[in-house]
Amino acid sequence: MFIDSHCHIDFIEFDIDREFVLQQCIKQDISQLVVPGTRVEHFERQLRLANTFPAIRNALGLHPYFLDTYRETHLNELQSIIEENYDSIVALGEVGLDKAISIDWKVQVKVFQEQVEMAKSFQLPLILHHRKSHNEILQILKQCKFNHGGIVHAFSGSLQIAEAYTELGFAIGVGGGITYPRAHKTRKAIERLPLSSLVLETDSPDMPLNGYQGKRNSPLKLPIIFDALLTLRTESTKEVQEACFQNVFNYLVHM
Ligand SMILES: [Zn+2]
């Protein structure tokens, strides 16, 4: 059994065949898919999809990419929708900081900090988005004394950075990045981390795997990421698969 711990199956890229993809997931033993929140306008759609497809587990949050339409009221709206749906929400996310986009850095930091505080008050784990921002994210998590853990989505970076997150109670999201031989540093980190810190994810429709560049990514590619992970690990197939599955329950809530 597999869980895709990060998958945007709610995005329009899946409008033409979402039901088919989800049926195929069940056939391939992908029993659950965690769908992270991106923006307020999309929350109702996410909640509706989870009612239709029982494999979907929602997180809700304001993703840094979509802060171009951010308004002060969005944080209050996020808070109320989490309150109303608390028992079905697996984490607050995806939230974080991204230095490769043009969204004002101060706005990113403010919205991230406020959401870390919100997750803390709800006692919810976080799903973290990072790009060239590990140090700033770690600093904010420490300043806020955040201790409900969660998942660092699509981790890339050194073993030292990965360990800074695991020390704070976070799992490391293993995605398509490890299928690229050039990702030496990340692959080394994934090789050395304890199995109890690893979860699998695709980030579909984004982050195509090596050999599939330019194509829509799909949760159905999860077994390919799993195979790439196996080549980095010394444990048996069964051990790695069971750990990656069980870990999601340990790092997220209401699964
Ligand atoms: Zn994402």
Image: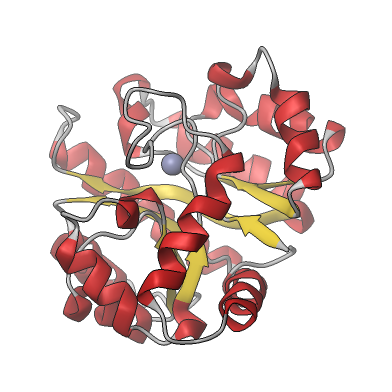
Q: Is residue 15 left or right of residue 115?
A: right
Q: Is residue 61 left or right of residue 141?
A: right
| Residue lying at 32% horizontally and 60% vertically, measured from the top left | 155
Residue 185 lies, in percent from the top left, at 16, 67
Residue 139 lies, in percent from the top left, at 19, 70
Q: Is residue 105 left or right of residue 21?
A: left
Q: Quadrant of ligand 1?
A: top left
Residue 21 lies, in percent from the top left, at 70, 30
| Residue lying at 23% horizontally and 74% vertically, measured from the top left | 188
Q: Nearer the viewer, residue 90 or 56?
A: 56
Task: Answer above or below: position of 2 versus 6.
Answer: below
Q: Is residue 219 left or right of residue 116?
A: right
Task: Answer above or below: position of 22 versus 122.
Answer: above
Q: Quadrant of residue 237?
A: bottom right
Q: Nearer the viewer, residue 150 or 33?
A: 33
Residue 92 lies, in percent from the top left, at 53, 54
